[in-house]
Every structure is written in structure tokens, then in C-alpha cells.
């Protein structure tokens, strides 16, 4: 018999019971449900709605149920639609009337909104921690290989040389923004719907401030209709997960390329590679590919919830029961991707010689040679044209710019002097880019300091909870 069966004469079929149940999904929220119920019971007693004796029995019973679920001895029955009913039925079975008083002044509508918000806060915080772990791995690689030069690319064509540390730090900034997005998702969830009851509030003199405090919410939601129907905080969480997954796809795509025979920039540790069942020689970057692939589902989770929420009239509608599966999946997927990427990045071996060898190809000094002429007074467009001619000559003679003689340079312009050779040195090219945020040693050192400061700030934000 369902907890609401009073006005019914016929039971739903076994199929519809299963179809309508959310228990297989919302089981994951049992800790939040128990915390919410304890806070509610205590508040009911403090407001004189139930006796403190009943509240104590309720809290003790809930503690025992939590232990049973923790250790796997709790028997779930699919006839209980969701985690809320499973726990409440069990409680009443255990302690009788006191358990049956728990739901006074409460509806599953404010109950589920409360649980889901507590869950979203917990997961956002756990993801923020995992995000920090990955950024630390990137920063460590940047520090350990600070001076290494590799070709910087645009259109995946050699463009200008950059420091490997600069390249790694670019990813830490993406992930730092993801951290901020997760923090915003935490904040969006951080408001208390409990006390809104089904949709309109309740006739009992509930103290909503009390449950706000005891559950650790930052504030009370001021409108009961909005409180039970708002799921924006889940959209925010899944969006934050989705964007971060997209960032990981970019990192992993580069790792797939870099570990190929064509690049040979990095070797992945065996612990983050797999072999082939037919080709004995193979070592595949499976985990980088898998992280790349998993992003699809997370983006799907976001779209799915957006469509579920579209056109819903106020207040609670059963459609909202579909809100949790995608959010749980998105958070778990991103958490696993962070864990995997952290291991992969921190164990990845860098090959500075191969990076440098590639940086010598593709006339990476071309912009600097043009700048050399421009600094001697030639309009930059004209300088660009002259260097283009020099590159063409190199292409025809199958050599690189730095292999040309001073005579070759002078043939194109009288402005070239002996010191042009200094412009062709990769280290000098890198170190000349001293603008704030540029790739010179000094600028990247400064940037590294900022990245570490942001990490410290974010660690402190996580530890504050
Ligand atoms: N299982 C439901 C959910 O997850 C709980 C709320 C049900 N409320 C209701 N009025 N049917 O959304």
C-alpha cells in the first residue's frame, strides 16, 4: 500500500508502479533525505508541532536507517516510489506513530527539492576539489618542463614557438573558469525550499529559518511555488560540468595527437594506455579518447533537462522527477574524467627534443624577421611581403629560414644586417614576447605565480565548507 493510498480503490499495475518509480535513481540521495528529515523533525518539535520525545525517536530511527543503507542491509521495496517513501515507511514500521508524524507540514515536493539542492551542493563541492587536483597536475608539468619549447599552432599549422609551460597553463586557466562555474552552481543550489510544503506553504507555524540554518543553506527561498518547481540550480550544475567536459576534450585531443608517432611529444604511462587484441605493437591513448567521448553524454544531460523543464506550469509536476538522473550522471562523469585526466597528466612523459625538433620546422621565425624589418622603418605589410618571398625561396629549396645566408636575406632587402641571425633563434623568439600574458620566460613566470595564487584561493574556498 502506498503512503497516499487512502482515496484509491485500485492499485496501479506492477508495470506502472515501476514506470512511476524514481527509487533506482534517487536512492543516491538517501543521506540528504535523512539530513532533511532530521532537521524538519527537530524544527517541528522546537515549534511545538510534535513532542521532543517523538522528534528524538524520529532522529534515532533515521540514524539507524542511515546505517542500514550505508552497510547494505536496508531492503528497498519498489512499491515505495522513491527514497523519501522508502525511508518514511521503514521509519514508521520501526517506531510507529512518531514516524507517522514526521511528514507533518511537509510534502514530498519541498522534501525532494531540499534533498536535490543538498545533493547539488555536495557534488559541486566534490567536483571543485577534483578540479583543483587536475590543475595541480598541469601546474606540476608546467614547472617540471618550464623551459621546453614546442611549436605553437594555429589551424594546426606551425605558427610561433611557445613554452610548454605556457601551453599547460592555458589549460589551467580554462579549468580555473570551470571551478568558478561550479562555485556558481553551488551558490545557485544554496537556498532552502523546506517549509513550502506542496506548493502554497502550510498552516503549521514552521520556522523556516531554523531548517535553513541546521541544513547549512545560505538563505530561505521566499516563494513557495518557486521553491518546489525551480530546478535552475541543476541546469547550472550540469552546464558547469558540460563546459568543463568540453575543455577536457580539447586537452585530450592534444594528448592523442602528441602521443602519435607523427608528433612523439609525449609518452603516456602504461597505466593510462591500452593494447590491441590483434596488433601486438599497439599502445593506444584509450583513456584520453574516452574522456573526449564522454563529453557527449554530459552535453546530452544538459539538453535533456532543459527540454524537461520547458513549458512546465507551476508548481510541481511529475516531469520534475526526471531531473536527477542526468545531474547525477553529469557530476559522476566529470568527476571520473577529472580523476582519470589527473593521473594521465601527472604520469605523462614529455619529450623536449622532439618538441624542439618540430619547432625548428615551418619557419617559426617568420613573424620576427618581418618585425625586424618593420622596426627598421619598413611598413609592416611590406616587411610581411618580403619575408613571404624568403619563405617561398626556402620552400623551393627545401630548407628553413635559419639556413639562409646573409646574402640570401640581402637579396630581398638592404635592411638586413648580420644581426638578423639572432632573430632566428627560437629561444630569443620566445623570450622576446614579453607582453603580459605572452610566452617569454619572464611573462610565464609571472603567469605561473598567478595560477598558483588562484589555486590557493580556490583551495581556501573549498576548505571553507
Ligand atoms: N519522486 C518524486 C520526485 O522525484 C517525489 C515528489 C513527488 N511528488 C508528487 N506530488 N508526486 O520528483
Image: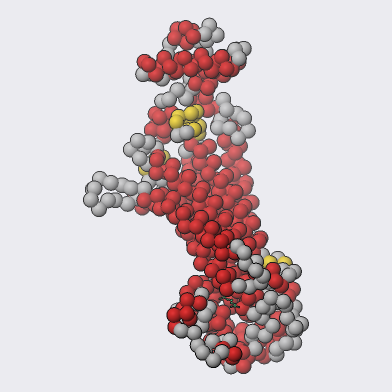
Residue drawn at x 53%, y 6% is 414
Q: Residue at x 55, y 15 (%)?
A: 383
Residue 185, by quadrant, is: bottom right
Nearer to me, 123 or 52: 123
The quarter in which the C terminus is drawn is bottom right
Front position in the image: 462 or 179: 179
From the top left corner, tell me how far across and down residue 225 is, in percent.
70, 71
Q: Name the residue at 50% across, 26% down.
A: 427
Left or right: residue 78 compared with residue 227: left
Q: Quick check: 333 above or below 7?
A: above
Quadrant of the image where one finds ligand 1: bottom right
Q: Nearer the viewer, residue 111 or 41?
A: 111
Residue 96 place in picture, x, y as percent: 58, 93
Q: Is residue 293 left or right of residue 442?
A: left
Q: Position of residue 53 (x, y in %)?
A: 67, 90
Q: Position of residue 71 (x, y in %)?
A: 46, 78
What sort of colour scheme is used for the picture? secondary structure
Work out whether residue 69 or residue 239 is closer to the camera in this orientation and state it. 239
Task: Kindly tell me whether residue 203 is visible in this rendering.
Answer: yes
**Vertical order, 76 against 251 (above or below):** below
Residue furthest bottom in the image: 96
Q: Residue at x 32, y 52 (%)?
A: 274
* Residue 92 falls left or right of residue 347: right
Amino acid at each position: 500500500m502506498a503512503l497516499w493510498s487512502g482515496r484509491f480503490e485500485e492499485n496501479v499495475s506492477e508495470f506502472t508502479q515501476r514506470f512511476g518509480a524514481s527509487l533506482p535513481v534517487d536512492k543516491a540521495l538517501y543521506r540528504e533525505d535523512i539530513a532533511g528529515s532530521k532537521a524538519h523533525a527537530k524544527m517541528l518539535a522546537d515549534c511545538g508541532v510534535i513532542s521532543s520525545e517523538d522528534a528524538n525517536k524520529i532522529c534515532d530511527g533515521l540514524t539507524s536507517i542511515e546505517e542500514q543503507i550505508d552497510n547494505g542491509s536496508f531492503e528497498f521495496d519498489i512499491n515505495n516510489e522513491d527514497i523519501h517513501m522508502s525511508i518514511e515507511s521503514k521509519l514508521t514500521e520501526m517506531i510507529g506513530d512518531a514516524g507517522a508524524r514526521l511528514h507533518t507540514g511537509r510534502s514530498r515536493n519541498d522534501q525532494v527539492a531540499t534533498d536535490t539542492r543538498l545533493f547539488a551542493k555536495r557534488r559541486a563541492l566534490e567536483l571543485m576539489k577534483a578540479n583543483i587536483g587536475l590543475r595541480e597536475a598541469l601546474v606540476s608539468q608546467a614547472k617540471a618542463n618550464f623551459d621546453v619549447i614546442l611549436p605553437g599552432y594555429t589551424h594546426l599549422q606551425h605558427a610561433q614557438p611557445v613554452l610548454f609551460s605556457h601551453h599547460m597553463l592555458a589549460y589551467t586557466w580554462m579549468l580555473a573558469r570551470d571551478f568558478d562555474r561550479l562555485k556558481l552552481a553551488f551558490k545557485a543550489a544554496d537556498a532552502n525550499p523546506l517549509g513550502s510544503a506542496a506548493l502554497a506553504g502550510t498552516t503549521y507555524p514552521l520556522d523556516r529559518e531554523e531548517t535553513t540554518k541546521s541544513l547549512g543553506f545560505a538563505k530561505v527561498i521566499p516563494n513557495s511555488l518557486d521553491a518546489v518547481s525551480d530546478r535552475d540550480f541543476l541546469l547550472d550544475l550540469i552546464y558547469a560540468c558540460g563546459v568543463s567536459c568540453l575543455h577536457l576534450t580539447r586537452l585530450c585531443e592534444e594528448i592523442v595527437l602528441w602521443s602519435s608517432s607523427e608528433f612523439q611529444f609525449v609518452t603516456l604511462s602504461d597505466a593510462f594506455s591500452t593494447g590491441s587484441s590483434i596488433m601486438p605493437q599497439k599502445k593506444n591513448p584509450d583513456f584520453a579518447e574516452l574522456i573526449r567521448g564522454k563529453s557527449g553524454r554530459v552535453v546530452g544531460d544538459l539538453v535533456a533537462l532543459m527540454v524537461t523543464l520547458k513549458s512546465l506550469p507551476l508548481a510541481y509536476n511529475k516531469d520534475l522527477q526526471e531531473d536527477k538522473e542526468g545531474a547525477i550522471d553529469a557530476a559522476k562523469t566529470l568527476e571520473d574524467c577529472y580523476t582519470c585526466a589527473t593521473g594521465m597528466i601527472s604520469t605523462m612523459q614529455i619529450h623536449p627534443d622532439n618538441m624542439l625538433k618540430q619547432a625548428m620546422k615551418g619557419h617559426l621565425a617568420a613573424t620576427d624577421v618581418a618585425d625586424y624589418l618593420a622596426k627598421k622603418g619598413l611598413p609592416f605589410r611590406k616587411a610581411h611581403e618580403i619575408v613571404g618571398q624568403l619563405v617561398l625561396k626556402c620552400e623551393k629549396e627545401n630548407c628553413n629560414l635559419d639556413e639562409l645566408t646573409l646574402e640570401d636575406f640581402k637579396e630581398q632587402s638592404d635592411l638586413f644586417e648580420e644581426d638578423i641571425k639572432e632573430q632566428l633563434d627560437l629561444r630569443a623568439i620566445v623570450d622576446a614576447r614579453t607582453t603580459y600574458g605572452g610566452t617569454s620566460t619572464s611573462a610565464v613566470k609571472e603567469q605561473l605565480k598567478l595560477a598558483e595564487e588562484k589555486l590557493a584561493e580556490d583551495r581556501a574556498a573549498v576548505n571553507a565548507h
